[in-house]
Image: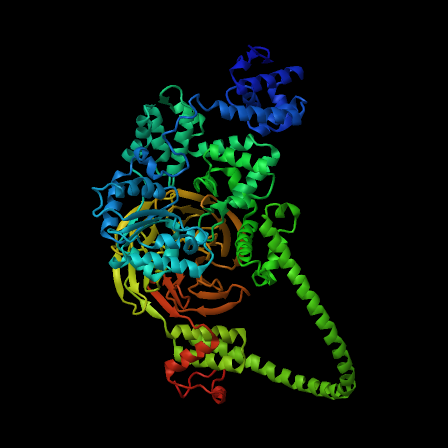
Amino acid sequence: MVGVLSMPGRPESPLDPSQGPVQRFAAELRKLRAEAGSPPYRVMAQRTGQGASTLSQAAAGERLPTLPVALAYVRACDGDAIQWEERWREAAYETAAELRPQDEDAEPPYRGLARFEPTDADLFFGRDQLTHRLLDLARSRRFTAVFGPSGSGKSSLLRAGLVPRLRTPATTTPPPAALRVLTPGAHPLRTHEQRLEPRGAEGDTWLIVDQFEELYTLCQNQAERERFIDRLLAATDPANRLRVVISVRADFLGRCAEHPALTTAMQDSTVLVGPMTRDELREAIIKPAQSVGMIVERALTACILDDVEGEPGALPLMSHALLETWHRRKGRALSKAAYKGAGGLHGAIARTAEDVHASLTPAQATLARRILLRLITPGEGSLDSRRPVQREEFDFGDAADTKTVLERLARARLVTVDEKVVDIAHEALITAWPRLRQWINDALERLRLHRQLTEAAQSWNDLGRDPGALYRGTRLTAAEEAFATSDATDDFTAVERDFLTASSTARWREQQASARTTRRLRRFTISLSALLVLSLVAGLTAWNQYQISDQQRRRAVSAQQIALSRQLAAESATFVSDSPELASLLAVHAYKIHHTAEATASLFTAAASLHQRQLSGHKGSVAAVAFSPDGRTVASGSADGTVRLWDAATGKRTATLTGQTGVASVAFSPDGLTLASGGRDGVWLWDAHTYRPHISMRPEGHGDIATMAFSPDGRMVASGSGQLVQVADPVTGRILATMNGETGTVESVAFNQDGRTLAIGSSEGTVRVWKVSRHSMSIRATLYGRTGIVWSVAVTPDGRTLASGSRDGTVRLWDVASHQTRATFTGQGGAAKSVAFSPDGRTLASGNSDGTARLWTLPISAAAAISQICNAYHRDLSEDESSEYLPGQRHHRAC
């Protein structure tokens, strides 16, 4: 036994190096410390920056320390870091092997990150009710869709739930003529065209299309994608004798809706895969172990149920944690201690991945990063997705090292490997392993460009390396800049490297040919220019004198026009509320005299004022307005505790929602299915069709909810209360991120187009922009500084115009690029508490403290504004009438 005293009277627990690599490594660390004179851990901590308790635990022998901690311990004792890193890697590899029980060859009852296959039906528990519902719907419909978030178990439901039941003769009559399971891949029609044909026998051919979202993440050919979908939709014709069941990740519902026929087919034939109940989860935990003669401790079951509850997409995390717990079992029992030792629900995947990473040499670890990044497709407005890869794409690096890396990743069930294809076992690995997440974030833009280059290089190769398929122009420049260094091109396959080299060479040849042509033209031009110069000199001298005098004349006239235009615009502004007709005519002529900024703003203001509609009925101030995604409905929220819905075209009220206290904010979800309202009692979420509330959330901070906004993808809802902004999951109500950096009261929030930034208007008169994710918020910029409270902000769908509502009762439109005012609307009847744009950006809604809401139809150009005014008064305002609209004039004969 080995024991080394850290200080008099405080001995460390004894170690037995024969008990395994962890105790042996700890004993060696203690020996190193003893040889260094047994410095106190607090002194070692001061030398390294690590905590004293962390260094003490490194030599405790309970678990292997991380490599940075181990090397810090060694540096504090003046040890050889290179030598000790090698010792640590040997111990890590032995530890990973030691954790496997003696009956390693036994097939585990849990599948980890891997999906359940039809042969695993006897281990697939907890989804009986959902499987029966899917089977009944699929038998009554010829096209069925299964939707659910990543990690909800869609693939396992189809493969281990539906497929075995379809193969049972008594389940489906007549039985299927054929049963085919496929995933679309990068070329769905080319790869699966033969499998889309029904078999020429009695009964229907069933086609199970798993991971339907690959049509959008992997297939880059839109025409091929459309044709593949059309072939699937042929199943809706009974004469076709084809039945189709697809599974789609929930965040791709909007992409599916882009295809009208697909949308129609899914209307009444969709199954939503939601979270499992506690009883269903208990079955999924206990029964697989029982099927192989194992038992699960009650404490472990209770712990897992508590960990999983309220955690979206937790099934692969739970399955992997159970698999690692099974590997660490002692006897016939799966224990809570083994579960915690594996890392628990959120740490098991990371610990398994880190164990594999630690077992690799530095060269193999670098190769592992390159391999895993090639297996990922960055999301475009959605989550990152896995990317199945042909094995020949891994022709970079040492072949032996590549084989070792793939074998160890596959043995840990982090990837799946067959004869042709390598794939990540589940997308949960992308979010659950911090090291992989960091790799992706560090190379995100280059990764997107690499995916595009891979697809282009493959197409070029398939076309016999046709020069017409090479990169040119900005695409070639972007690729060259992204992959300028040698380490960047190390990730290339031979085809990709040849493709980029051929593109650069082709451009060089084109440039050389162009240069020769340019030189010939230059010589000709010089000769011609010499003949022209002499004849032009005299003419230019005379012309220059004329231009000088003409410019002086024009400058005098222009100054008069600018002054008159500005005066007419000012006159127009004074009549907008009391005499909109006169204000409109003055604005038109101000703009025709000269296109000053003041004239343009008055023109837009006057045109929009002609088409405003007042929505009356609230008994308190209207603090919030919002358009539905289709632009047909306007929602207004009031201090009287009601939410009223209006027809945007007619201004008629269609519904009134009651029950909440002091509504201060309203927002529609991007799909139009949910209406959120915020007030003194938190955030309520209403069904936009039945007008019934289905969930309420009370963000931390205990303040009234002053403002709210959905992210464009509907996966986040931001709410402001006091100086606090919180981002929550609208499905579960769980708080995702919190921001507390405003110095004034938060009055309004608005997401931008991609959902990655959030604009916040506050009582200090500023609009700040924050970077937002599902886990954090950070300040990016302060856009506008104005005096007075900014009650509300909104941005047009094209991102070019910002509207702000102010305490002084004005609504201003700002040009985002120039920060100039485009229009100012007054006469609100009180403070402008809320503003919102319609989906097409043509209509602006404002809510006011006088209990009314107003709709303004916005012209898209100055010409459109003039046209609106002329049509409103049935006049053709010609240039020669300008003299009749003079500053100070109080009426006009046409009014």
Q: In this view, does 203 lie above or below 813?
A: above
Q: Name which residue lies at 31% across and 54% down.
A: 198
Answer left or right for 828 relative to 654: right
Q: In this view, does 698 lie above or below 331?
A: below
Foreground residue among 736 and 196: 196
The image shows a total of numbered marks equal to: 0
Q: Quadrant of the N terminus?
A: top right
Q: Name which residue lies at 44% across and 28% down.
A: 342
Residue 638 position, x and y percent, is: 32, 57
Residue 502 position, x and y percent, is: 63, 57
Foreground residue among 731 and 648: 731
Q: Name which residue lies at 52% across and 74% down.
A: 598
Residue 420 position, x and y percent, is: 48, 43
- The answer to whether residue 589 is seen in the rendering is yes
Where on the picture, by quarter, is residue 668? bottom left
Where on the picture, by quarter, is residue 525? bottom right
Q: Is residue 17 above or below residue 704?
A: above
